[in-house]
Image: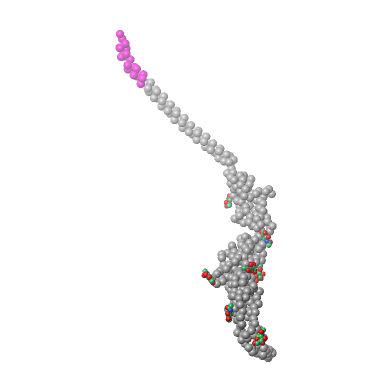
Amino acid sequence: MPWRGVHAWSLTGLLLALCGSPTNPFEVTVNGASSEVGYGGTVLLNCSTSCPEANATGGLETSLSKEWVGRGPGWLSVRLRNITEPLSDILCYFSCFGKREVVTFRVLAYELPSPQLAISNPNTSCNQVVTINCSSAPSWPPGLKLRLRSSRWPLQPWAEGAVHLELMAREEDDGAEFTCEAQLSVGNRTLRRSSATTTLHVTYQPQMDDGSCPPSQNWTEGQDETLRCGARGNPPPLLECTKDGEPFPAGVLRPVTRAHAGTYLCQATNPLGTTVRSITVWVQYHDPDLVLLVLLPVVVAVALVAARVGYGVYYRKKKIRQYRLQERQKQLEMQVLRSKQDRAPLNDVGAAP
Ligand SMILES: *[C@@H]1O[C@H](CO)[C@@H](O)[C@H](O)[C@H]1NC(C)=O
Ligand SMILES: *[C@@H]1O[C@H](CO)[C@@H](O)[C@H](O)[C@H]1NC(C)=O
Ligand SMILES: *[C@@H]1O[C@H](CO)[C@@H](O)[C@H](O)[C@H]1NC(C)=O
Ligand SMILES: *[C@@H]1O[C@H](CO)[C@@H](O)[C@H](O)[C@H]1NC(C)=O
Ligand SMILES: *[C@@H]1O[C@H](CO)[C@@H](O)[C@H](O)[C@H]1NC(C)=O
Ligand SMILES: *[C@@H]1O[C@H](CO)[C@@H](O)[C@H](O)[C@H]1NC(C)=O
Ligand SMILES: *[C@@H]1O[C@H](CO)[C@@H](O)[C@H](O)[C@H]1NC(C)=O
């Protein structure tokens, strides 16, 4: 029903026209509309009015501690000291011919309050959503910038206003640290403050994979080896390995025998759960019995044959040499005999007296 809206509007206009008509218009002003000071700073105010009434009275309302500088006809001046409230509205009023006019003067004190960091659940488990808020007191002045600093990501740019973040907690986020930082530029100065640091704790159940716990391991007999198996988890899991029901601690060096071959079970436990993994260990060995049983007789037989053949050759050569020597001997004896027979007559002659 549009006519009703029109009616309401006209009524409001009429009321405004009736009540708002100033018979003696005057105004109240404060030098400047607002002021910005550092924490604990001081502001000097002069509030004055255009009221023509000579004895127009005014006053000031503030929760800040004030000190009168002076007052005169149509003006008053105060000094506000030690301003620690982040935001203060100071009311200055004057009465003029029975009318009262009020102005508001705003003082901002830039003591940066500690920015607030809120983490929905700093103790979380894997794959849970965590909400992180970096914010400041609601009354904070425009120009305040915030950022969420974390060991998990590179430094972010400053943002106007609060920073809200949701992240899915992962294993590697365990121990990640978060800090909320605030920055404000006042005049030529830059103020900064940080919240306390909060550490995210991410719990997760034991994990073993091919890297930390290879499913197949080759050992060599006679060498020192360890059963290689490790488990990650938060809280750190307790790892127990067994072979045929007997405890067999992983990571302990021990001399290997072929009896070590077989299947090992490793079980990692923390309050969030248990993970089991089996490992097959192969033991490589060179069997000395096999060498002795097969190779040695062959070697011996070969050696015997070789010796026999060698001796045969030697014996024949020796025989031949002996025969030749005997032949030579015979020849020599023959020569000696022959020469004796040749010389015999001479001897007889010589011997004859
Ligand atoms: C305050 O302002 C009035 C008029 O504007 C002036 O006459 C007066 O001297 C001022 N007072 C101070 C302390 O500056
Ligand atoms: C202010 O002056 C007017 C006359 O100009 C007078 O009627 C009134 O009583 C005075 N008020 C005070 C508080 O002195
Ligand atoms: C300023 O105010 C604060 C608290 O409001 C107080 O602790 C401090 O002593 C004051 N300083 C001065 C110089 O008055
Ligand atoms: C973070 O801020 C959002 C929105 O303001 C709010 O819904 C949520 O509850 C806050 N989380 C925490 C942990 O304060
Ligand atoms: C989170 O866990 C840590 C130890 O991991 C403990 O000191 C702290 O009290 C826990 N906080 C909460 C809120 O459960
Ligand atoms: C900052 O401003 C103040 C006055 O507002 C001045 O005294 C000071 O020298 C300035 N500092 C710099 C570094 O400009
Ligand atoms: C272990 O040895 C077997 C053969 O003996 C081989 O097939 C396997 O690849 C080896 N594994 C590793 C991890 O060396």
Q: Residue 30 sits in which quadrant?
A: bottom right
Name the residue at the top extreme. 353
Q: Position of residue 66 (x, y in %)?
A: 63, 74
Quadrant of the rendering where the C terminus is positioned? top left
Q: Nearer the viewer, residue 327 or 177?
A: 177
Q: Position of residue 276 (x, y in %)?
A: 66, 55
Does the magenta portion include 11?
Answer: no
Quadrant of the rendering where the N terminus is positioned? bottom right
Q: Quadrant of ligand 5?
A: bottom right
Q: Position of residue 213 (x, y in %)?
A: 62, 54
The secondary structure making up most of the magenta span is helix
Would you place residue 282 above or below residue 201 in this image?
above
Q: Position of residue 174 (x, y in %)?
A: 63, 60
Residue 311 in the figure: left or right of residue 22: left
> Residue at (68%, 56%) from the top-left corner?
270
Write down the region rendered in magenta: 335-353
Q: Residue 42 sits in which quadrant?
A: bottom right
> Residue at (62%, 75%) from the top-left corner?
68
> Residue at (61%, 62%) from the top-left corner?
177
> Residue at (59%, 44%) from the top-left corner?
222
Q: Nearer the viewer, residue 298 or 123?
A: 123
Q: Nearer the viewer, residue 222 or 267?
A: 267
Total numbered badges shown on the rendered structure: 0
Q: Nearer the viewer, residue 192 or 20?
A: 20
